[in-house]
Image: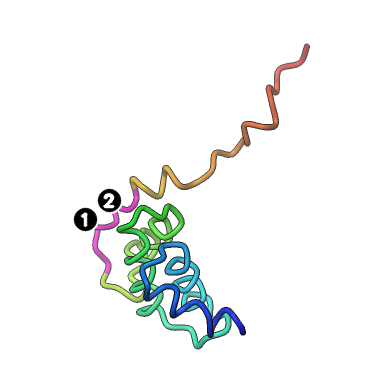
Amino acid sequence: MSGAEYLPGVAESGDALAQAYLGMMYDYGRGVEASPELAVKWYTLAAVQGNAFAQYRLGTKYESGEGVARDYGELHWYGQRRSRATPSRKPAWRGSTKKA
């Protein structure tokens, strides 16, 4: 069973991770026909449950107007979450850059 066959049932049951993955599949056309509108639908369902990746992607959609009307109010709200979801440039595991 492929992800395109399995994920819709899990996503429809309310699983935020499955909803975010399904949004990504529709966003990039992976295993399904690309549909910005369906990507926004699934990202939204996952984002309201606190999925950081979906919040990030939804913010980019409101910024670009792809699949949804450009909305700067929504962009601001999701942009705040997007900044929290975006990793820092220097991963914590790399340690200090100071020379001994």
| Quadrant holding the N terminus | bottom right
Residue 32 spot, x, y in % from top left? 52, 86
Magenta stretch in the rendered image:
70-79
Q: Nearer the viewer, residue 34 or 25?
A: 25
What amino acid is found at the position of numbered circle 1 in the picture? Gly
| Left or right: 90 in relation to 29 | right
Name of the residue lying farthest toward the right: 100
Q: Is residue 57 magenta?
A: no
Are there few (<14), some (14-19), or many (20+) residues within 10 Å of tag 1?
few
Q: Are marks 1 and 2 in contact (CB under 8 Å)?
A: yes
Q: Position of residue 26 (x, y in %)?
A: 47, 78
Q: Where, by quadrant of the figure, is residue 71 drawn?
A: bottom left
> Residue drawn at (36%, 68%), measured in percent from left and top?
14
Q: Main secondary structure of the magenta part?
A: helix
Q: Residue at x 30, y 58 (%)?
A: 48
Q: Is residue 71 magenta?
A: yes
Query: Looking at the picture, how far across and down is residue 81, in whole percent?
Result: 36, 47
The numbered disc on residue 18 is none
- With 24 as the anchor, is 13 left or right in this view? left
Note whether 17 is above or below 84 in the view shown: below
Percent coordinates x, y for residue 58 in the rendering? 37, 62
The amino acid pointed to by label 2 is His
Q: Which residue is mark 2?
A: 76
Residue 94, quarter of picture: top right
